[in-house]
Image (cartoon, grey):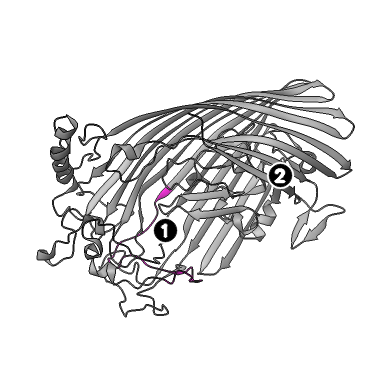
């Protein structure tokens, strides 16, 4: 089956570059210094005005001045870039209108993010990237030749400040709205004649949440006089009126070593931790998902909730359960890697890159319903391990011909589970009215999860040829082979454990019949009709029904795909500092399996790879 195809025609891109340091003939525009800068967008150092790409660069000083502390903040200054919260604490990045609206930890993005050439394979890992930077380079996509899969929208390259040959140190502190304090610091210098190191730290904290409860904040239009429930314990003040406090820390240690006259080695260890309060949702309408009961299946507290005006301009107005729950993230990440560069001869260089990393969300508790009663709130437990290696050669076959040849291999191993708290969700009704507690009679807890292993191997080639004075032809291709193995299911939950995110009290016990029993009953009815004996879903086990046998159990699937991405461009140096170019490029976004609460295995069918072709005419 041929992959889906998108065609993107970009008529004109005019690209400006901002400076690394103020120099002679520097102009100033809206507080940003603008001049020719050196970039590594094509995996070698060259001037931003010398490459046929739509590229935008900002210095580290610019990012600090504009308050960019997270990749999500780049939308403040980068045309064509946008960020959206995926709802499960996963960022969705869109560049040039190309994005992937999938909110699980296992979802591959369309915008690749790199730090000093090292890939961060999933958007959730990019929270602490904006630390101690020399600059950021944004390449508008597709960028499938040198950067590979998942750059149909483009690539973001962070370039960190490097260890210095002389001892230096510095720092800054600031205070902003919502009682937010930020502190940054670094120390850098030589450890020996051939080794230098640098350590950078950042902490951001706020003591006031930026979101206001629509029903409990006195200034809200829907304030009902309820000030919250004093449940006692450490978190007795949580959730009364506001949400969105920030508690983030990040660090980077880097080291460079001149191992020989022709060998240089660099090493990094990055990490961050996020214990902030997550973002709550705005409800603009309430519809029953109960096909049998319709509106009668709505819990009274949900049906009577005062929804937001869909045209509201108040992005602070939201809501979350008034039940003493501690909605808080518990996310952490680290990555480490080494880069070795050899100058093999005057016309031949080699580079090796190797990195590993791990992301973990340990019970992050996220409000999902947007109402003030427990409806579809969730805990997220996820672990992602990855490693990546790349080897490439580059050189000049002729004074007018430059080339690069490389191979790349990576593995991503993701395990994700989400536990749902759905006491009042309509699809689980009828309500257990005899008890008078308004809890769903079928079940008040469920979960879903999946494990996914992706193995990707690629080989790429790129070349530039000065075909005439002021004219250069460039191009390349990349072959990628990807294998993705997945298993997952919708799951009954045995909740004698803690609900996560430092909640005081143990998880509420299951009430009602239970989804395991319900789906076992469905199997009894449907399996004989399909020609199979019925199956049983164990308490706490998988209840997803196999599409063929109608027996509950875990789904297993594989996705094997390959592709050839490429780019060809012709550029014309029509003035000393001006370049015009025309380019044709093709990129691919990886396929993936969904991780959602699934009742039928057919819903686990994967999204296949997506192809994007682009024609671009621009000037730098």
Residue 70 appearing in the image:
no
Neighbours of disc 2 within 10 Å: few (<14), some (14-19), many (20+) = many
Q: Which residue is mark 2?
A: 54
Q: What is the magenta segment's predominant secondary structure?
A: loop
Left or right of residue 11, residue 326 in this image: left
Q: Nearer the viewer, residue 205 or 352?
A: 352
Locate residue 604: give its quadrant: top left
Residue 170 pos. (x, y %): 65, 54
Left or right of residue 360, residue 10 in this image: right
Residue 42 pos. (x, y %): 70, 35
Kindly identify the residue that appears in the image at 16 percent across and 34 percent down: 529
Locate residue 566: give its quadrant: top right
Kindly state the secondary structure of the residue where label 2 is placed. Answer: loop
Q: Nearer the viewer, residue 319 or 43?
A: 319
Q: Nearer the viewer, residue 214 or 230?
A: 214
Magenta region: which residues? 308-331
């Amino acid at each position: 089956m041929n992959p889906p195809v998108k065609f993107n025609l970009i008529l004109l891109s005019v690209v400006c570059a901002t400076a690394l340091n103020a120099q002679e003939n520097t102009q100033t525009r809206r507080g940003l210094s603008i001049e020719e800068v050196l970039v590594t967008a094509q995996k070698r150092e060259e001037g931003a005005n010398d490459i046929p790409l739509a590229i935008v660069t900002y210095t580290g000083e610019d990012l600090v001045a504009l308050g960019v502390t997270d990749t999500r903040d780049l939308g403040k200054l980068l045309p064509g870039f946008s960020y959206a919260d995926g709802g499960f604490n996963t960022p969705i990045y869109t560049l040039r209108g190309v994005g992937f609206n999938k909110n699980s930890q296992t979802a591959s993005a369309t915008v690749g993010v790199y730090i000093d050439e090292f890939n961060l394979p999933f958007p959730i890992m990019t929270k602490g990237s904006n630390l101690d930077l020399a600059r950021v380079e944004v390449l508008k996509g597709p960028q499938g030749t040198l950067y590979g899969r998942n750059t149909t929208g483009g690539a973001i390259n962070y370039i960190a400040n490097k260890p210095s040959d002389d001892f230096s140190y510095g720092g800054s502190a600031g205070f902003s709205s919502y009682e937010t304090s930020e502190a940054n610091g670094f120390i850098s210098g030589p450890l020996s004649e051939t080794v230098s190191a640098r350590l950078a730290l950042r902490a951001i904290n706020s003591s006031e949440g930026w979101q206001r409860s629509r029903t409990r904040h006195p200034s809200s239009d829907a304030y009902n006089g309820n000030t919250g429930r004093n449940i006692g314990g450490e978190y007795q003040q949580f959730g009364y009126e506001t949400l969105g406090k920030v508690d983030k820390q990040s660090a980077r240690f880097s080291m460079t070593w001149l191992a020989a006259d022709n060998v240089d080695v660099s090493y990094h260890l990055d990490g961050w931790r996020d214990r902030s309060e997550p973002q709550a949702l705005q409800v603009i309408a309430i519809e029953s998902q109960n096909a049998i009961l319709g509106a009668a299946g709505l819990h009274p507290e949900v049906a009577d909730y005062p929804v937001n005006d869909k045209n509201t301009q108040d992005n602070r107005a939201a809501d979350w359960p008034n039940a003493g729950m501690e909605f808080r993230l518990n996310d952490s990440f680290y990555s480490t890697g080494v880069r070795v560069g050899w100058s093999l001869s005057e016309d031949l260089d080699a580079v090796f890159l190797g990195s590993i990393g791990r992301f973990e969300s340990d019970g992050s508790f996220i409000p999902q319903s947007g109402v003030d009663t427990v409806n579809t709130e969730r805990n997220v437990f996820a672990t992602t391990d990855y490693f990546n290696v790349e080897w490439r050669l580059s050189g000049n076959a002729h004074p007018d011909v430059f080339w690069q040849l490389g191979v790349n291999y990576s593995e991503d191993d993701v395990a994700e589970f989400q536990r749902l708290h759905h006491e009042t969700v309509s699809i689980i009704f009828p309500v257990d009215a005899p008890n008078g507690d308004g809890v769903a009679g079928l079940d008040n807890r469920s979960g879903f999860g999946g494990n996914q292993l992706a193995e990707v191997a690629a080989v790429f080639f790129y070349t530039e040829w000065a075909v005439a004075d002021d004219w250069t032809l460039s191009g390349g291709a990349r072959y990628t082979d990807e294998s993705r193995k997945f298993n997952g299911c919708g799951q009954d939950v045995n909740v004698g454990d803690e609900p996560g995110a430092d909640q005081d009290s143990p998880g509420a016990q299951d009430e009602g019949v239970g989804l395991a029993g319900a789906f076992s009953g469905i199997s009894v009815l449907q399996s004989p009709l399909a020609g199979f004996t019925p199956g049983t879903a164990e308490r706490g086990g998988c209840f997803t029904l196999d599409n063929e046998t109608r027996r509950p159990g875990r789904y297993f699937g594989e996705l094997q795909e390959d592709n050839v991405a490429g780019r060809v461009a012709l550029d014309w140096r029509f003035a000393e500092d001006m370049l015009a170019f025309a380019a044709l490029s093709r990129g691919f976004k990886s396929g993936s399996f969904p991780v959602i609460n699934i009742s039928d295995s057919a819903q686990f069918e994967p999204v296949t790879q997506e192809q994007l072709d682009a024609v671009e005419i621009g000037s730098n």
